[in-house]
Image (spheres, grey):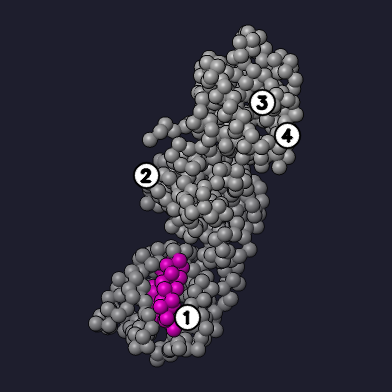
Amino acid sequence: MRTGAAAGHRGFFHETGYYGSDDDFLALTLPFVEGGLAAGEPTVIALDERNHGLLAGALEADIERVTVLPASDQYARPAATIARFRELFGGFVADGAAQVRIVGDVPHPGTGASWEPWARYEATANLAYDDFPVWGLCPYDTRTTPADVLDEVARTHPHVATHGPGHAANPSFEDPAAFLATRPPAPPDPIEVAAPAAVLVGPTPKAARAAVADVAAGTGLDAERVNGLVLARSEVVTNAVVHGAAPVTVRAWPAAGRMHVTVTDTGPGPDDPFVGLLHRAGPESIGGHGLWFAHQLCHQVTMARHASGFTVRLTVHS
Amino acid sequence: MPAMRVTGVAASAHGFGKGDHLCWAYRRTDEYLDGVVTFLREGLALGQRGLYMAERPEAALLDELAGLDGADELIARGALQVRPLTYDMRSGTVGAPAVVDVDEQVVTYARATQTAVDDGFTGLRAAVDATPLVRTAAQREAFGRWEHVADRFIRKHPFAALCAYDVRAIGDEAIDEMACLHPRSWGAEPAFHLHASPVADVALSGDVDAFAIDTFTLALERTVPAMPGDDLVIDTRDLTFIDHRGLLALARHGRRLGVRGVVLLLAPPIVHCLLEMVDVPLVRLASR
């Protein structure tokens, strides 16, 4: 039996809540956590340091009964966040959990992160966890969260916690696929104003791998990062060749401890707005994995459809 | 650790030893003859008996070896032999089957190599234009299996072979199919090479990516199978790239053979990286 606001709900109950003070934050999160503990539900907190301190202080000894994940680890990259949460939820459900509660601080410019990947994450989360009985609460601080982010938060959460505390359906929620389709394309990385160190038009996959490895040699990145980037780029070029339209152009920009690669083809890009974040194809299928791999292997992956085609941008850093 | 073989693309037919195996993919007659004559000349200098086979009468084959000094004298003293491709060395008749029988082939070449040694040579060196034997998929299937068995034989015996294929006659795809079963190739750049190894069941070098996967699957099927229940050990020290498709092809191959596991020896870091992300049954790593 699921408890609380998600009682009777099937799948992922994705809720946001807003707070403007420490007291508001606790009013939102403390009953959520205490309710989970009281019901014997696995309860997970993945909060930044300050919010963690507030909640831990209020929970006192009960903090020992909570599964704690540092937000800085858990929310490093959306693809890794999804992979880790799915593994965690799967374990709890296998152990017989009727519901899992999770409250997490999703990054945004107010916390020093780019919102672009996390907007995709918040929309995709609605599908990514929907095969688990999970109640997820995403609290946003109205003092630090930019207005345009708050607008997109409202559009990506089907449920909203109200003060009281209460819970309501969120009338601003949009179909996640439709939401992603209307977002503007991701902006280019600032490094792209400089001339790339390598440009390959229609390279063989082998030549492109060699070129990326060559350019990476001067960045000081370790072999693991370079291998990841080479593999990610290989998958993205394979996708572009197989699904896109020729010619495929690969550009690479090295920097100290950082490497940025773009892959552009002249096709329309993938139809699936969740591509790369949801691993929908089985591992034995050929194709459909390229962007998922890229998201697993790179620190940042963005995709943009533009007048002359489709560009995937890959970044790794040390 | 036994000496490792050099693998990959060859710059010429020069410098091969008594136990080397070279694929010679040619587009012009002069390229073809240059490879054959150079390869035979250097084998003769190493004291090996030379054997030249192509689908032409003996007189025509002798004419093609005009670039070899003293060819008549070499023939007279048994240092050089020319045979029509369909000449059956065991029966002494012309008209061998167009689809090779791998067991027959290995017995034939083992005997010819031993005979060369018994006759006082340091081994046997063959230059063969095998184009007529790989025109159809069924022929390539049989000849591909033979190429791999030959590679295993060559690794342990004083037998060297240059296998010439006419790219114009069979096309790039078929060339890759044959070239990848040689440790070295000239005129063809298969993405990967699958060949005999002194320390493993087979060695894999080069790149296995999405575009090489069909050829890779075919090539794996043409290698000598490991026994069911055993490990299939693959030397991957010279593997420069593989993706999840390649690893999954190895898993499927292992499952088909019924082996206990597919063990990758000295696998490059990219394999570690992939195995962390994708669950690949059967495949595991060894770092001996």
The answer to whether tags 2 and 3 share a subunit is: yes
Amino acid on which the number 3 mark rests in the picture: Met
Q: What element carries label 3?
A: loop
Of marks 4 and 1, the one in the foreground? 4
Comes first in the chain, label 3 or label 4: 3
Range covered by the magenta-colored residues: A81-109
Question: Residue at (57%, 22%) from the top-left corner?
Answer: B115
- In percent of width and height, residue B166 lies at 69, 30
Mark yes or no: residue A198 visible.
Answer: no
Percent across and percent down for residue B206 are 52, 40
Q: Which of marks 2 and 4 is in front?
A: 4
Label 2 chain ID: B
Query: Do circles 3 and 4 both sit on a common chain?
Result: yes
Q: What element carries label 2?
A: loop
**Whole-percent x and y of residue A304?**
57, 58
The one of B254 and A149 positioned closer to us in this rendering: B254
Residue bearing mark 1: A133
Rate crowding at label 2 as few (under 14), some (14 to 19) or many (20 or more) other CA atoms within 10 Å: few
